[in-house]
Amino acid sequence: MIRVALVASVMAMSVAASLPVHGGDAVSAMDSVVSVLPDWLGRPPNFDEPEGSGVVIGDGRTVVTAAHVLGNAQRVLVRTRDGDIVAARIKAADKATDLAVLEIDAPLVALRFAGDAKVGQRACAIGNAFGLGISMTCGTVSAVNRAGVGFNAIEDFVQTDAAVNPGASGGALVDAQGRLIGVLSAIFTKQSDANIGVNFAVSGPLAERVVAGLEGNGQIAWHFAGLRLKVYPAKGETGRQAAWVAQVRGDSASALAGLKPGDRIVRAAGRRIRKPQELRGALARLKPGDKIVLDYVRAGMKARTELTMN
């Protein structure tokens, strides 16, 4: 995919009883990140398999990774930081967010989700860069709630300048305490697949929501509260950016919340909404029954409503 720069996913070709939840620092979090080794269908026998990364969460037997790492894999192995290679089973995947869940028999120390990342905080990327094994690079959180980047159908990214290279896809973005703030997904590059400091991780809250859905039902049906949205203002026009409501399904959560065509949604749960993809990212974090406060403009007047996902 070509945008302003060449978009590259962060995969690499190979160069050659429940345990406790991790708690401590970013360095010790490396023990909770594994190399993911898929066996892809149709790949020539003498062709090296691609490698990615995965993060151990939950009960220590669950591994979240990037769906594109698995591709059409017939089977998957994972390699621990210490070099143990164990079998993994593919439980489910969600292409819209590029996340997948694996299961392993031997439990490892799991990472905890940290909640929302904050701009300026320290962030460390842990993954299997270039297929060399688990390594770590550190930087800062450059931006949060990134959407409309063009990688996935549903995006709620944490952007970081911590170096991320091919092979790290599916790895961990952690804070200074070693808590999970994102699952590494993709990088922007200009001339090659190498890092240039603009890297993206699926936000912790969205990843946690997707994993729960995949473990519960094996799939997620994305509805976005019955809204059809458009960009505002239209190209070439002026005005304050927002997600413009083009249509509201009659029996939807949005209709029950009182939203109408023509409304311009400017905030969701306090976060600024500048385009439809940002609102979809905010709604994607919610499970049925969750509530979210939306600020919008109708006929020039500011208004607020609470929407309950159904």
Image (cartoon, rainbow, N blue to C red):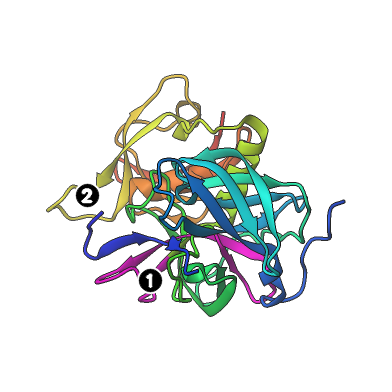
Quarter of the rendering containing residue 226: top left
183 or 65: which is nearer to us? 65
According to the picture, the residue beneath numbered tag 2 turns out to be 233
Magenta residues?
171-199
**Residue drawn at (50%, 26%) of the image:** 256
Q: Which amino acid type is shown beneath numbered disc 1?
A: Val
Residue 100 drawn at (x, y percent) = 55, 45
Q: Which amino acid type is shown beneath numbered disc 2?
A: Pro
Spatial separation of the CA atoms under disc 1 and disc 2: 27 Å
Whether residue 37 is in magenta: the answer is no
* Side of 150 where 204 appears, left or right: right
Residue 117 drawn at (x, y percent) = 56, 66
Label 2, residues with CA under 10 Å away: few <14, some 14-19, many ≥20: some
Tell me the tag on residue 198.
1
In the rendered view, tell whether residue 163 sits above or below residue 298: below
Quarter of the rendering containing residue 249: top left
Label 1, residues with CA under 10 Å away: few <14, some 14-19, many ≥20: some
**Residue drawn at (76%, 74%) of the image:** 24
259 or 193: which is nearer to us? 193
Residue 61 drawn at (x, y percent) = 74, 49
Farthest residue to the right: give it.
Answer: 17
